[in-house]
Amino acid sequence: MDGQQAFGPAEAADMLARRVNGVPLIPLLFFAVAGLMALVLGLRGRKIDDHPICRKCRFDLVGVWPGAEKCPECGAEIADARARRVGNRRRSGRLITVGAVLAAIGGVPLATLVLSVLIGPAANPYKPVWLLVTEARYSGPGVATAAMGELGSRITKKKLDRVTVSKLIAEGLARQADVQAPWLPGWGDFIMAAWNGGFAGNADLAAYIRGGVQFEAVVRERARVDEPTALKIVGRSSRLSKSADIWIAVNFDVIRLGDVEQHDAGTAYIRADTMNAGGFGTGFGSPTQTGPAAWSVSWTVRLMAGPPTGGMMAPSSIAEWKEERSGTITVVGADEPMIEVFRDDSLAEQLCGLIESPRVSIDSGRTFSVGSGEPGPEPPPTVTLLFTITEPFPIDAGFDVILAWQVAGQRVEARAGTLAIEAGTKGRIVRSCGALADGQVLPREMAAIGLILRPSFRAAESNGDIRRGWVGPDLLFSEAVVDDERERNTWRDRY
Ligand SMILES: [Zn+2]
């Protein structure tokens, strides 16, 4: 079991150095050892005289030895010093009692701990609260999560008292606030269970949400004049429950770009667990009404968070707060690239060689008109590009996808969306490129088609992760295989 492996010697040492539900473990160990020593001393007894004693049968040999060779009681040889002891002893009932009590105080919790680690989470329903709390605090993530889960389910079953729940909520919030320590989402699950069970107030929940939501607001590095600044929210390993149904409304309250101030630039609704997962982006922005230059940009983000209300995503306003963020943005002219562009014509041949067996799949979607039983007008065909990149693609690049074919001896070209390939991409690629531009329609029954990948910084920009894109000559594929799905879909849609 995962959890058991997670509890190693390091965790055991760590556990010993700390406390069990307020009781330090070192004293427990001390009690256990001191108790055992007292028990041994008590059982051995205190010397009450200096008579010689037969070691075998404990017969008092006073007046017998020295003189006799054998014990008159059991017949053992007593000439050898090792066969005799000195002094009668009396057991100490008081020492035995004190020893047993001390050993029990220290030993029983320790033994239970060791036993629970050996048994693992299977026995959780039968464990006392202090033991579960100890596991939640000091065990590896597997055992700790299982223990917090059991504690949470005891709230639901009304088997935990309010004082204990309040203490654990306070501890959970303190752990959440300690950003140096790893966060165990199980504590968040517990706080949510407490709130759902009426054991935690809205103030507790608000503190938990505020403490858990961690994000960065990122503005893209460049924007064209009159295009949005595209603010993005990026969650940063938020310290919340993994499963909590908490929604966060992130409102771009004020965006300041140079002298221009924009209010209420939009709201994003984010489920807290999505944030927990690491990152998400939502484009938001005010048009850049400032001229080409580098500008400082700052914004006030208003957050509202809580369990969802009647609406799907709108959170109840359990927690409300504002955060300020700032950055810089370079505004460029309308025709300039927003990413860094590098031109290297010599790469074209290599890139072309990496793209293997391109196919063009053409699909016109649904063509059936409801009611009439007749196929409807054919919508512009959409193009999906399929190919294999044989080696990791060496650079970031974006392309306009252009199809070329012959009609009555005339060459026709039509653009079908864009394709961005990040450096390192390898293997089978399937990319939908959208419909052919200008409502152009491909003739049917074409087995092969010319495919042109025309480097485009705008296509590269459309992939938000590309910061530096390649431009160079067109990549030409004279005969891409055509899979024409139009007939099939027309047939399928008729039934
Ligand atoms: Zn004897």
Image (cartoon, rainbow, N blue to C red):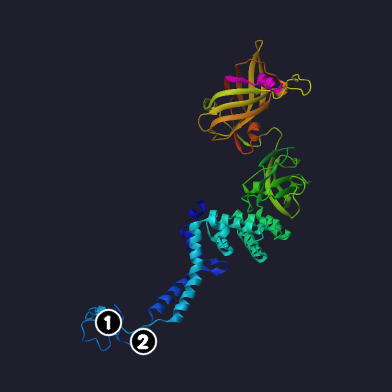
The answer to if 481 sits in the magenta stretch is yes
Label 2: few (<14), some (14–19) or many (≥20) C-alpha neighbours in 10 Å = few
Depth check: give the residue in front, 414 or 194: 194
Residue that label 2 marks = 48
List the residue tagged with mark 1. Answer: 73
Q: Which residue lies furthest to the bottom in this view?
A: 63
Q: Residues within 10 Å of mark 1 (few under 14, many from 20)?
A: few
Farthest-out residue, top: 408
Instruction: Please name the residue shown 20% across and 82% down the image.
Output: 69
Q: What residue type is labelled 2?
A: Ile
Of the numbered discs 2 and 1, the one sitting upstream in the chain is: 2
Q: Which residue is drawn at 36% across and 86% down?
A: 48
**Residue stretch rendered in magenta on the structure:** 479-495
Q: Where is residue 41 in the image (x, y as percent from the top left)?
A: 40, 78
Cα distance in 3D space between marks 2 and 1: 21 Å
Q: For residue 334, which quarter of the picture?
A: top right
- Classify the position of the C terminus by image quarter: top right
> Is 29 rendered above or below residue 468?
below
Q: Quadrant of residue 47?
A: bottom left
Q: What element carries label 1?
A: loop
Q: Is residue 1 magenta?
A: no
Residue 179 shows in this picture: no
54 is higher (above) or lower (below) than 262 = below
- The structure residue drawn at horizontal position 49% and vertical position 61%, both measured from the top left corner, is 115
